[in-house]
Image (cartoon, rainbow, N blue to C red):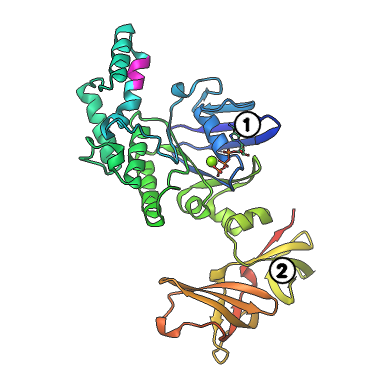
């Protein structure tokens, strides 16, 4: 467990500034996510922290120790890759034991080094003492892989292989766990359950974790805090709620999965009220933006629907037509056209008998407080 500080990190690939001045501080025991679109520099940032890339500029400090010039194996980090990166010819046990043997090799005298190298070259496992064997079993137990020691990675499912990779990263008891899109190759159901596993293990060990993903739902649901990256820079850093409720820029609002993100003009501001023109609609929003050009965001779950004859009260009330509907079990999602705008609406706990169908005329209402105004940069 240790604090991680990244100061003014720059990584150049020729003329490309893959990481362009990233600074962040991850607290001890914190689960921190780096979120952003493909190519924004997440992996490069993580690899610089791990010591797998050499920064062009900047400083990395783990605990109290500057590690910028240390090789990867001298940093107290365990890393999990998207591709698992397991050794196919080694058993599950020996894959997990790899880091322990590598450490014995580094710390051993010439005889130990020769013995480990010899067994590696002849593909025999160098024997570990009872305490280290127990460490491997504990790591496998932690990820729920008891009894799988003797199998080859190829005999395991993708999810189980990723658990082996996680055990391998944890077995050396690193202070910092670095994960680069570890769940991207798994199907959705498995992703969600593995998310829970990773979070529980991180909390049980109280290990500092930095988790790279381009999946906003994953970042929001896992992280204590996250940084959103765009083109090598951090554009917003905060808790999931801060970022979801107050996206700093239209890019963040868009990336964080805002449906109903309408380009708009704030046309008149009272002390606590703004009239917003979006498309052919005018509606009320709480608060006062500093700029006239804004994006108005209305969350799908903040919108109420009712049939034309049903009572519905809201600051903003419109008539519309259902264009599309999908029953998703816990919610139903609709697209409702109101003049020239289409609103995405999530209805919680839909009763299967009372669903809307395309072509239905409806009322659509939302509160002024639920309209978020994001200023254009
Ligand atoms: N070894 C390299 N040589 C040259 N360019 C590289 C190298 N590694 C990464 N890049 C470039 O640096 C930029 C950032 O890459 P990086 O892999 O950090 O992005 P990412 O945010 O992890 O994206 P993804 O979500 O696709 O994994 C990209 O434009 C990429 O093409
Ligand atoms: Mg990447």
Residue at mark 2: C-beta within 8 A of ligand 1: no
Query: Which residue was labeled with disc 2?
Result: 272
- The disc, 1 or 2, on the residue closer to the chain's N-terminal end is 1
173 or 42, nearer to the observer: 42
Residue sitting at the far bottom: 309
In the rendered image, the residue lying farthest to the top is: 110
The image position of residue 106, as x and y in percent, is 38, 15
Which sits in the foreground, 229 or 159? 159
The magenta segment: 102-106
Q: Main secondary structure of the magenta part?
A: helix
Q: Position of residue 199 (x, y in %)?
A: 39, 46
Q: Is residue 123 above or below residue 242?
A: above
Tag 1's secondary structure?
strand
Q: CA distance from mark 1 to mark 2?
A: 41 Å
What residue do we see at 34% from left, 16% from top?
A: 105
Q: Quadrant of residue 110?
A: top left
Callout 2 secondary element: loop
Q: Taking the image as four quarters, which one is ligand 1 found in?
A: top right
Instruction: Please give the residue where the numbered disc 1 appears in the rendered image.
Output: 9
- Disc count in the image? 2
């Amino acid at each position: 467990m240790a604090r991680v500080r990244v100061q003014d990190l720059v990584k150049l690939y020729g003329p490309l500034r893959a990481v362009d001045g990233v600074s962040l501080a991850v607290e001890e025991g914190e689960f921190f996510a780096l979120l952003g679109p493909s190519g924004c520099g997440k992996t490069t940032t993580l690899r610089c922290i791990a010591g797998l890339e050499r920064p062009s500029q900047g400083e990395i400090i783990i605990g109290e120790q500057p590690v910028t010039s240390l090789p990867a194996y001298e940093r107290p980090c365990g890393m999990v890759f998207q591709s698992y990166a397991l050794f196919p010819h080694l058993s599950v046990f020996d894959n997990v034991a790899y880091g322990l043997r590598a450490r014995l090799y580094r710390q051993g005298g010439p005889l130990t080094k020769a013995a480990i190298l010899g067994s590696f070259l002849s593909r025999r496992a160098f024997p570990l003492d009872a305490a280290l064997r127990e460490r491997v079993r504990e790591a496998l137990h932690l990820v729920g892989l008891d009894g799988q020691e003797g199998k080859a990675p190829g005999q395991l499912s993708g999810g189980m292989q990723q658990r082996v990779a996680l055990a391998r990263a944890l077995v050396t008891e690193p202070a910092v766990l670095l994960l680069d899109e570890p769940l991207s190759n798994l199907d959705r159901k498995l992703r969600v359950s593995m998310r829970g596993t990773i979070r529980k293990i991180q909390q049980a060990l109280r290990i500092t974790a930095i988790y790279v993903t381009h999946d906003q739902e994953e970042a929001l649901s896992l992280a204590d805090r996250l940084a959103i990256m765009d083109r090598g820079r951090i554009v917003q850093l905060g808790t999931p709620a801060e970022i979801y409720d107050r996206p700093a820029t239209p890019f963040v609002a868009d990336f964080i999965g805002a449906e109903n993100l309408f380009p708009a003009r704030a046309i008149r501001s009272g002390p606590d009220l703004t009239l917003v023109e979006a498309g052919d609609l005018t509606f009320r929003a709480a608060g006062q933006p500093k700029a006239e050009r804004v994006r108005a965001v209305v969350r799908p779950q903040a919108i109420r629907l009712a049939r034309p004859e049903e009572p519905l009260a809201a600051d903003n009330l419109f008539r519309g037509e259902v264009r599309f509907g999908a029953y998703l079990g816990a919610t139903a999602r609709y697209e409702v056209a109101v003049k020239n705008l289409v609103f995405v609406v999530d209805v919680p706990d839909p009763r299967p008998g009372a669903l809307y169908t395309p072509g239905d005329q409806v009322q659509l209402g939302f509160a002024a407080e639920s309209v978020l105004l994001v200023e254009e940069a």
